[in-house]
Image (cartoon, helix red, strand yellow):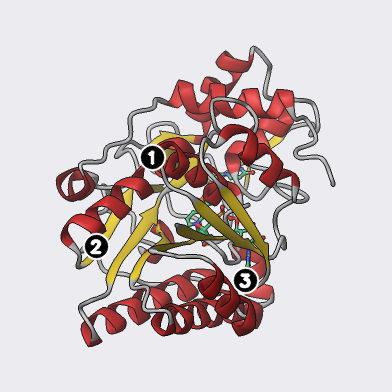
Amino acid sequence: MILVTGGLGYIGSHTCVSLSDAGQDLVILDNLSNSKAAVLERLREICPNVVQFEKGDIRDKATLTRVFNTFKISAVLHFAGLKAVGESNKSPISYYDNNVGGTLCLLEAMTAAAVRTLVFSSSATVYGDCSDVPIPEDNSRSATNPYGRSKLFIEDILADLYASDNQWRIARLRYFNPVGAHESGRIGEDPVGVPANLMPYIAQVAVGHREQLNVFGGDYPTRDGTGLRDYVHVMDLAEGHVAALRGLQRQGGMLTVNLGTGRGTSVLELINAFSLVSQREIPYKIVERRLGDVAQSYAAVGHAEQILGWKAKRQLSDMCADHWRWQIENPDGYPES
Ligand code: NAD
Ligand code: UDP
């Protein structure tokens, strides 16, 4: 059985589907701080295998001990954590507590239970303000905010752990910009309040929840002046986790891998692609640059293909079509339950 922390969240829930499709039974541990119980019902509809659920916090040792004692866990996929850059500037302690402190508790519990296979959700944010694209895994790392620093700290903790005991099998997966939803339209991204990210914002404008999109900066040194990012379909990302788990089971070691498509898409290109797929107009206005944004960020993807045999398959039009299906079929996100 695989333990999925944060498995009711956006990326975790989609990864549960891919794991289940790959024949795995799952137990999800989530404190519902940024997700709803309805996700579990939807997962049980879609997933062919057993999905167990424990409501609880990864910082709670008793909960972790109970989970490891109750289920026969062979590996952990660790998504639980806080992820909003702006909020992390305002509440750095809760970011370090949840992300770093939570990971330490999890690692202690894994050690006690002799479970030493871990796939960790890192982020392209560890490349700091690097704009030299495509970005390879051996690029220098830095942080520009507490969220990013929490990911750097955890990456380093995992490297130290592996150096101390190479029985551990650890994958540090650096996601670029996950977007889209499962093809069924049953699960997707359900941000609380005003979306901080581009794709959910565009989708909410398209569905009529918001009037217009603010495009942050039109004077970047890019082909149309707006920022370039590496948008990757969340189901491709999910399949990347299955590939990482198989890679660890096959060869052990510590893997550090970018998960992206290797292609940069501008804000205006994403607006146009979404508009085409949804047949909706997306009104927008170009405003000041957002503080801390880089002009362009996209992944070097050769390493993922070489060591995991994984490559993103889905196109930008698929990302928009699947995101739109989720949005139009669930205009207010998941129901409260
Ligand atoms: P999310 O907020 O949708 O999911 C995180 C889940 O973890 C939520 O269900 C939340 O309730 C749960 N959680 C948070 N703290 C917890 C705790 N202490 N104990 C138990 N459960 C807890 O986020 P996501 O977009 O699915 O991101 C998953 C991971 O991927 C995060 O670690 C995030 O930093 C990382 N990541 C996300 C992105 C992105 O753009 N979404 C990009 C790079 C990296
Ligand atoms: N962006 C934008 N308007 C928004 C949100 C984002 O123009 O309301 C731009 C942002 O400046 C960046 C791109 O969209 O160029 C992706 O931003 P997002 O926050 O989704 O991802 P990240 O900045 O973390 O890569």
The residue that mark 2 highlights is 255
Using the numbered discs, state the Cα–Cα distance from disc 1 to disc 2 in whole angstroms.
Answer: 21 Å
Quarter residue 223 falls in: top left
Estimate how packed mark 2 is, as few (under 14), some (14 to 19) or many (20 or more) residues with alpha carbons within 10 Å: many
Q: Tell me the amino acid under the disc marked 2.
A: Leu
Of callouts 3 and 1, the N-terminal one: 1
- Judge left or right: residue 330 versus residue 289: right
The secondary element bearing badge 2 is classed as strand
Residue at the spot x=33%, y=63% of the render? 172
- Which of label 3 and label 1 is nearer to you? 1
Does 180 sit above or below residue 160? above
Quarter residue 152 falls in: bottom left
From the viewer's side, name the closer residue of 234 and 195.
Answer: 234
The residue that mark 3 highlights is 88
Q: Answer yes or no: do the residues labelled 2 and 3 have beta carbons within 8 Å?
A: no
Percent across and percent down for residue 119 are: 38, 62
Percent across and percent down for residue 174 are: 37, 57
Asked whether mark 2 lies closer than 8 Å to ligand 1, one says no
Using the numbered discs, state the Cα–Cα distance from disc 3 to disc 1 in whole angstroms.
Answer: 35 Å
Estimate how packed mark 3 is, as few (under 14), some (14 to 19) or many (20 or more) residues with alpha carbons within 10 Å: many
List the single residue furthest toward the right.
337
- Judge left or right: residue 298 versus residue 59: left
- Which of label 2 and label 3 is nearer to you? 2
Estimate how packed mark 1 is, as few (under 14), some (14 to 19) or many (20 or more) residues with alpha carbons within 10 Å: few
The tag on residue 111 is none
Q: Answer yes or no: do the residues labelled 1 and 2 have beta carbons within 8 Å?
A: no
